[in-house]
Amino acid sequence: MITLQDISYSVGGRNVLCNVSFTVGDTEKVGLVGINGVGKSTILRLICGTLLPNSGTIIFPRSAPVIGYMPQTVDDLRAPADQTVFDFLASGRPLVRIEKQIEQLTESMSELEGARLDTAIRQLDDFQQEFESWGGYNAEDELLQIISGMRLQGIDLNAKVATLSGGEKSKVSFSRMLYSRPAVLLLDEPTNHLDEQSKKWLMAFLKQYRGSVLIVSHDSAFIDSVVSKIVRLDEDSGEAAVFNCGYDQHLTITAQRREEQNRAAVKHQAKEDKLRDYLERTRGLSGKKGKQVQSRKLALAKLQQQEVKPVKERRQVSTQIVAAQESGFYPVIVKNLHFGYQPGREVISGLSFHLSKNERFVVAGPNGAGKSTLLKLIAGELRLQRGEIVIDRKTQVSYYDQEQKNLNPDNSVLTEVARVAQLPQRELRSLLARFLFPAETVNQKVGTLSLGERSRLALAKITLQGRNLLLLDEPTNHLDPATSAVVCRIIREYNGTVLVVSHDIGFIEALQVQRMLLLPQGAVTNYVRSQVQRFQE
């Protein structure tokens, strides 16, 4: 069991967590929920020790458990440059080391006798027990089941780890962690790079997992299918509320509590108003009436000390993206494009298509098909190898990178937006407030923001740029559902051209996409839900 006891944590003078307490029991599956920036990822990092709390205690069992932590993004798999994907996956368990120790000890035993032989036999028995505890000769079958369940068959398992795309790195890292069988799984948005079939497999895997699981996810169907307890972080107080039920039931309970609190606040205010009205009407009276007046004054003071506030309505992103000028009729034309990260292995091969002015165009395909690579080539983030990308002279490009590498982690929030617009600080602060960055957060370092907050900051920069072509790579990956819906409306109402990569079918359809590019084959057709959905199933 892991226990968080009165944990508080602050960033840049802003209290993120305040006296948070809850437990994750042995084999218990817990969902950690709340809006972007409320401290969910922070809690995972506090548990695995990459952050330290300002106050409070995290209590582990007497023997500290092995913790497997899956962050939202994976930049570096920390694998040797020449290691293959399969060998990297297999290294999740120490079986190769144990087998080598057994082999060396077995070879040496022929030269031993007496007490030394007895010691060697005991050591050999220990090694064999350790080997069996890690799955022994069934381990490879377990690994192959994970490879199948996570749908890694589309990745060349003999390829070098360094050649993987960002999405492939996340899936491979996640698969290796599952194979390594830690006692505690800390999962931060684990479905971001998974299709529907992989999600279904992962649901079943986690339900029967023998360790503890703490999940952060905006995918309500996924989290509801796995967990039996919800911990909800409050954005105003920084405290945690614990619900011994699934996600949907916790929403019902939360809504009931909000209604009860709002009714109580209305009733409380009515009592205060009635007393104030009485005191106003009886001002200056003395004698018997004066005693009643004094009694009502005391009653009003008591009510004011017991203040009951209505539930604070959550603010939403409020802005619009407006292209300052129109583009040409064909903002981008791609001609016979070829690109690969390794000689002889092309990610994009012979691709040709064009974008039409003001259209909504989606790029679809499995992980590793070159979707993000294509957007980086158009944005100029990668250098062309063969072929041509013609950018119309009137086209102005804004690029949203799902890995958010175009944000400087050392800048303050205010400095980061000032990089793209020479505006008075008052106007920049006003814009940031519309993207839910209040005055007390604008001097916070970008590197301390949650990924959801960084997503909002990247969108704020795009708003300031006012360009006529948006290249959006998974723009809703790190956003909570309410913010995702608002962002979708903002982009749908945008008066320029949109080229988007997204695994979120609901987002794509709400965006009213007109055409799609299917990779790796390079076919361009009118939007058909079933064809895009095929890559999610």
Image: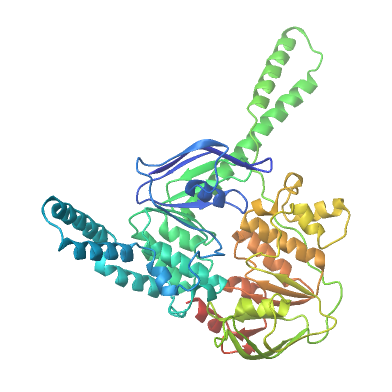
Which residue is rendered at x = 76% and y = 21% of the image? 279
Which residue is rendered at x = 69% and y = 21% of the image? 301
Does residue 491 sit above or below 10 in this rendering? below
Q: Is residue 405 left or right of residue 55?
A: right
Which residue is rendered at x = 29% and y = 65% of the image? 100
Looking at the picture, how far across and down is residue 377, in whole percent? 69, 79
Looking at the picture, how far across and down is residue 193, in whole percent? 52, 69
Q: Quadrant of residue 225?
A: bottom left
Q: Is residue 46 left or right of residue 335?
A: left
Judge by depth and name the residue closer to the eye, 352 or 317: 352
Q: Is residue 164 visible?
A: no
Does residue 376 sit above or below 206 in this rendering? below
Residue at the farthest left position: 114
Judge by depth and name the residue closer to the eye, 469 or 267: 469
Judge by depth and name the residue closer to the eye, 87 or 202: 87
Does residue 523 sit above or below 271 in this rendering? below
Q: Quadrant of residue 525?
A: bottom right
Q: Quadrant of the N terminus?
A: top left
Q: Is residue 187 left or right of residue 166?
A: left
Looking at the picture, how far across and down is residue 316, in whole percent? 70, 55
Looking at the picture, how far across and down is residue 311, in whole percent? 63, 43
